[in-house]
Image (cartoon, grey):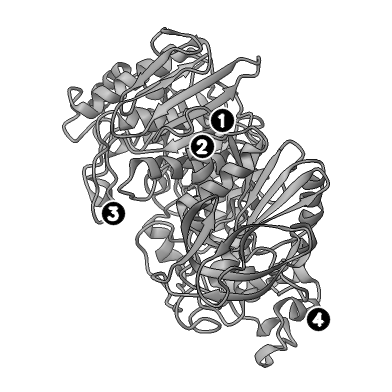
Amino acid sequence: MRNQIRYGGDYNPEQWPEAVWDDDYAAFDLAGITTVTLGVFAWAHLQPAEDRYDFSRLDAIVERATAEGRSIVLATPSGAMPPWLARAHPDACRVDFEGRRHVYGQRHNHCPSSTAFARLSVALAGRLAERYGDNPSVVAWHVGNEYGGACYCDRCAAAFRVWLRERYATLDRLNDAWNTTFWSHTFTDWEEIQPPSALSEHWRGPNHTAFQGITLDYRRFLSDALLGGFLAEKAAIRAHVPHTPVTTNLMGLYQPVDYHRWAEHLDLATWDNYPPDDPSPVRTAARMAFAHGAMRGLRGGAPFWVMEQTPSTTASRDVNAVKRPGVLGLWTWQSVAHGADATLFFQLRQSRGACEKYHGAVLDHAGRTDTRVFREVAALGAQLASLGDATLGARTPARVAVLLDWDSWWAVEMSDGPNRNLRYLDVLGAYHRALWNLNVLVDVVPVTADLDGYDVVVAPLLHLVKGDLPSRLRTLVERGGTLLTTFLSARVDEDDNAFLADAPGPLRDLLGLRVEETDAQQPSVVNPVALDGRVHEARHVFEIVVPDHGTTVVATYGADFYAGTPAVTRAVRGDGEAWYVATALDDAGVTDVVRRVVDRHGLVGPHADTDGVEVVDRVSPDGVRHRFVLHHGDHAVTVTSEVTGTDLLTGRRVSVGDPLTLNPTEVLVLS
């Protein structure tokens, strides 16, 4: 098979008679499908009873895919356990936040601490690897599916205590971390500790907790417990398959699981791209770019795979609109622009029943190849084939980093005060969207990332500060870089306890200010902020800042008793600058601040002021730069080319200064 971006998706031929398979593969040939993901939800027919395995159906499926020349992503089926397992081992089912033991049903339905589930899932993973591991068509192993969810059972409580012993070693250290002198919570025995559920530390839902430290640690524990299941299956595969990549499909910007804690254990980062509904296609594109960047950032900028996207429509929302003509190709090319070396669908043939029977697919229930969706899939397959290996392994030459931190995400949204209307991703998204609108090349990285290669670090809502991050940020600034951070940053340590110092704690001297008070108001309350001759709206949180001598006031509040006090500041440290935004500015205000920061380094990208035009560069291992120009807007625009190159999709030659008219959903890949 020609070396190219992998193209295909989830295929479940066990749902149909073998006569249908002939039609499927004929259609796959027409569509340019190179890769099939098999066996994701196959546990019930692979192991019909605890003491009995049956691989005959999967044997036939794998043999057919191999004979057809398709690459195979082979899954372990632990994403949904079979009914017999729950009947034989009821404690494999989860206990929910309200303390109810679930009976069999749904998926994501197993307790991560269940010994029976662990034993059976690992055994099946080992048998699959032993049976199919030497098949050269298997190019990757896909463990489980979309890990997530929580359990509050007695087994998880016991496992949580073990996790806490390993983290804290002593009850004295734990009590200090959780500040248990508050409300007489001091623990004198490990067995006294309970999972923080609706029956213990919570009273109005998962984000309303009396002791944030306990809940923060339980979320860390659950992420690690799910990771433990993945690692156990991976080890079973590795016993038979020493080199083929082992991964699982992540879900992008998904709060319950800290993907940074998982990153080093994934041979390949993959994720499922189902962006939230938004009436603006441009905002949707910016959100997807944010998620692509976060997935690329898991493995130091290495390419990732899109393991799932829908060819047309989802089926899980109240209203499920189809993708408009051209959007399928546009979104796919956007993923390639941001680092995807594979782009796969869910699903290749539409399910005949259950909750995903109306979920989009390459082939509909009738198996037609003359539909609009199939024609677009086939046209995209031909484009990817013509591109070949030109972008495989290419990386993004970003000089700007956005810091994404799950601990801060959890801590901000479970905090009592100052404003429960505040959402971590909304704030990060606003700053990323400003960078995206300016066509700045951006990496989205963890707080532990090496910052030496960046000129600018954008760290909104960096609420929880841990490790040596303050010193690394100071080094960035003093060597000439720029730090941009915001309100509520550097307020708490890794245990979610407030720093006993002026806010913003360990960043106070670097930022050149102290926060004296923090006001919060209802979303309808607006405070005007004057910045660069324009007035912007600020909402939610209004910090009253006292700047140090020498700190420049860039913008001020226009209302309330703190009118005229700083809303945006800039401090010079060494050869660089540290910026602070003390309130939640509207999008235009965020963009004005971001533009000033990146313009200092000459990093504003091409066509930055053209609404909906996205420009992304990738550099191949051989040093060739590929520029992707994608138009997400709803009307044609004309821009002037800033590069000379050849469009790899059409063969058209483009020179510097040439006018480029871009229609909605149009894509150029200039080499």
Q: Label 3: which residue?
A: 317
N-term-proximal mark, 1 vs 3? 1
* Residue depicted at x 65% and y 91%: 183
Q: Amino acid at mark 3?
A: Arg
Q: Nearer the viewer, mark 2 or mark 3?
A: 2
Residue extending farthest bottom:
184
CA gap between label 1 and label 3 equals 38 Å
Return the mark for residue 468: none
Amino acid found under the numbered disc labelled 4: Asp
Residue where numbered disc 4 is placed: 172
Ranked by sequence position, the earlier of labels 2 and 1 is 1
The answer to which of marks 4 and 2 sits earlier in the sequence is 4
Which residue does the numbered mark 1 point to in the structure image? Answer: 133
Nearer to us: label 1 or label 3: 3
* Neighbourhood count class around disc 1 (C-alpha, 10 Å): few under 14, some 14–19, many 20 upward: many
Judged by depth in the image, the label closer to the viewer, 3 or 4, is 3
Determine if residue 335 is in view: yes
Q: What secondary structure is marked by label 4? A: helix
Q: Residues within 10 Å of mark 4 (few under 14, many from 20)?
A: few
Name the residue carrying label 2. 438
Q: CA distance from mark 3 to mark 4?
A: 47 Å
Counting from the top left corner in percent of width and height, residue 514 is at 72, 69
User: Toward the viewer: 583 or 92?
Assistant: 583
